Image (cartoon, rainbow, N blue to C red):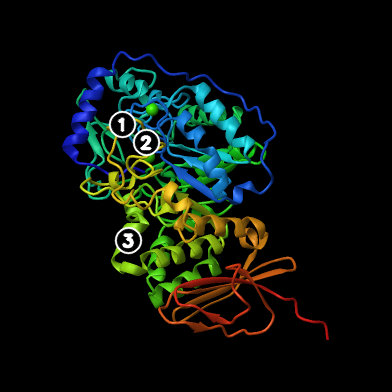
């Protein structure tokens, strides 16, 4: 979900959209029948880890300063080597915002700046060849104001598309969504409803034709072999009144129906953005998986040694389902700064504490979603507003080296300020780097199914130490993370086989700022 930007900017862009987009032809609205086909991916791939990627910022293949699908395909080897099993692409459909992509103008096409549908098909084929699944962002709640359907609906009260959006004349009073009145005047004098600002009008999700259109558009991608969706802002699908607009029962029912449509295809997956009630949306009867908003702040605070947060992290998965999608940060500023920026003030300990944050969410239950550049500690761009600092071009190489994000001298956004040290090329060569730490942990996770889907047992926070057991079948793995600056003694001294770090001798002393994983020997029969 994009953060709201200034009202004047939005009004201007909405007005421009009205002026210039009026004559656009309608996109493909035809019904798409289901054509479920087998998946080429291994069972269980949906356990991740996933990498969230902003295509615009990942790799530019043609030198125009804008990342694209062909560039992304070139980087699949890197993602495979890192140990990624799923990719979440932020919106790749044509969009009126020319940046983040959450203002769609056509649900069955590719953003021209990103390439062609053939480029997408090739990317998908190449990802599958490497055992990597691909899900894309799908924005159900709203289109762009520049969408030809909204343009037609706004221009003519008799338009067949009129009832695809939400209108009122006069605008109702008393509405307040995050400090703003969501009713905006249209060119004809009446008002339309737009949760996220005037450039993104809400669809009328009570209209069965709108639901059918989205169902068909999802099938369009699934029939191509896409592996699922990240559904944007689903608690906002249906509003009932100025008081009852967030997370209404109708929104949950619709979400469930979309989940069923997607999972009618073999081995597909879906994850929801539901900020207000993540755990409810992760339930099988709603979305099946949802981002664990809130947990990421506790994990980063725990990594700073905050005892209360360590306790909160220990407790989270005692009740939350293992289908929660976990993360440290994402593309939205409401979820926090880039992790590097959050830990900067810990000085010389920043890298060590960053590793502890990563280990915490990669070894706990949940489906981990890395945010591109997180694995190298990319910093946010300084001097930009809102979400933009989080969405810098990927730091592949230090300045002046070939093989960076783009051959253009003017990429669409400034590069990350710490790219001289925090880039893929430099960190590949440093065994102690964040990149190699992530790689090692992801390898450990993939080698031990207990770390992916094992039960969560015996979780305790003792001062600065978090420990818990992941248990699957006969396998019991003990994870111990010491967030403290002094070494700590592990209570259990018997029957431990060290798995990580590999060099550690059997020892029950936890070094300062360290993570250790042991296999618990089965108890001897009496
Ligand atoms: Ca490009
Ligand atoms: Ca809505």
Q: Of label 2 and label 3, which has the lower sequence position?
A: 2
Vertical side of 202 occupied by 296: above or below: below
Q: Where is residue 57 in the image (x, y as percent from the top left)?
A: 37, 38
Work out how far the residue at label 1 is from the one at label 3, CA to CA, in angstroms. 28 Å
User: Who is closer to the viewer here, 276 or 87?
Assistant: 87
Q: Position of residue 182 (x, y in %)?
A: 26, 41
SS at mark 1 in the image: loop
Q: Position of residue 4 (x, y in %)?
A: 26, 43
Q: Quadrant of ligand 1?
A: top left
Disc 3 within 8 angstroms of ligand 1 (CB): no
Neighbour class for label 1 at 10 Å: few (<14), some, many (≥20)?
some
Extreme residue in the right direction: 526
- Residue on which disc 2 sits: 102
Is residue 280 shown to the viewer in this render?
yes
Q: Which residue shows up at 44% across the image and 79% down it?
A: 464
Asked if disc 1 and disc 2 are in contact, CB closer than 8 Å, the reply is yes
Q: Which residue shows up at 22% across the image and 19% down it?
A: 19
SS at mark 2 in the image: loop
Q: Which residue shows up at 61% across the image and 60% down it?
A: 444
Q: Nearer the viewer, mark 2 or mark 3?
A: 3
Quadrant where the image shows the C terminus:
bottom right
Work out how far the residue at label 2 is from the one at label 3, CA to CA, in angstroms. 26 Å
User: Who is closer to the viewer here, 473 or 323?
Assistant: 473
- Residue on which disc 1 sits: 97
SS at mark 3 in the image: helix
Q: Which mark is residue 342?
A: 3
Asked if disc 1 and disc 3 are in contact, CB closer than 8 Å, the reply is no
Q: Of label 1 and label 2, which has the lower sequence position?
A: 1
């Amino acid at each position: 979900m994009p953060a709201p930007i200034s009202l004047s900017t939005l009004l201007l862009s909405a007005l421009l959209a009205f002026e210039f987009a009026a004559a656009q032809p309608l996109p493909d609205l035809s019904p798409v029948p289901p054509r479920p086909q087998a998946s080429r991916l291994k069972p269980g791939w949906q356990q991740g880890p996933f990498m969230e990627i902003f295509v615009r910022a990942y790799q530019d293949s043609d030198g125009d300063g804008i990342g694209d699908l062909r560039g992304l395909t070139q980087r699949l080897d890197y993602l495979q080597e890192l140990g990624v099993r799923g990719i979440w692409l932020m919106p790749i459909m044509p969009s009126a915002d020319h940046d983040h992509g959450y203002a769609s103008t056509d649900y069955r096409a590719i953003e021209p700046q990103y390439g062609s549908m053939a480029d997408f098909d090739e990317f998908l084929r190449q990802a599958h060849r490497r055992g990597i699944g691909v899900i894309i962002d799908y924005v159900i709640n709203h289109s762009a104001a520049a969408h030809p359907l909204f343009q037609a609906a706004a221009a003519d009260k008799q338009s067949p598309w009129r009832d695809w959006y939400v209108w009122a004349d006069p605008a109702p009073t008393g509405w307040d969504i995050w400090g703003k009145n969501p009713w905006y005047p249209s060119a004809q004098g009446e008002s339309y409803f737009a949760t996220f600002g005037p450039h993104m009008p809400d669809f009328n999700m009570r209209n069965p034709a709108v639901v059918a259109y989205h169902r068909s558009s999802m099938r369009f991608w699934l029939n191509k072999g896409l592996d699922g969706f990240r559904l944007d802002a689903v608690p906002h699908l249906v509003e009932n009144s100025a008081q009852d607009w967030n997370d209404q029962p109708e929104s949950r029912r619709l979400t469930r129906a979309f989940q069923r449509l997607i999972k009618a295809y073999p081995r597909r997956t879906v994850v929801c953005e539901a900020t207000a009630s993540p755990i409810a949306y992760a339930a099988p009867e709603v979305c099946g998986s949802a981002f664990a908003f809130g947990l990421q702040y506790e994990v980063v605070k725990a990594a700073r040694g905050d005892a209360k947060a360590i306790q909160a992290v220990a407790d989270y998965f005692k009740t939350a389902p293992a289908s929660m999608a976990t993360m440290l940060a994402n593309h939205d500023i409401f979820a926090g700064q880039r992790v590097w920026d959050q830990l900067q003030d810990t000085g010389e300990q920043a890298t060590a504490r960053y590793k502890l944050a990563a280990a915490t969410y990669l070894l706990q239950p949940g489906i981990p979603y890395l945010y591109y550049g997180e694995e190298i500690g990319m910093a946010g761009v300084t001097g930009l507003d809102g979400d933009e600092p989080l969405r810098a071009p990927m730091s592949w190489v230090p300045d002046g080296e070939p093989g960076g994000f783009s051959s253009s001298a003017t990429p669409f956004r400034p590069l990350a300020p710490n790219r001289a040290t925090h880039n893929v090329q430099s960190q590949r060569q440093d065994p102690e780097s964040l990149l190699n730490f992530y790689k090692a942990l992801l390898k450990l996770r993939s080698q031990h199914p207990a770390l992916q889907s094992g039960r969560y047992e015996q979780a305790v926070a003792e001062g600065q130490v978090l420990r818990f057991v992941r248990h699957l079948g006969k396998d019991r793995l003990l994870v111990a993370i010491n967030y403290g600056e002094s070494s700590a003694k592990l209570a259990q001294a018997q029957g431990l086989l060290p798995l990580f770090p590999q060099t550690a001798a059997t020892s029950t002393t936890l070094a300062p700022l360290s993570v250790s994983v042991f296999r618990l020997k089965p108890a001897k029969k009496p």
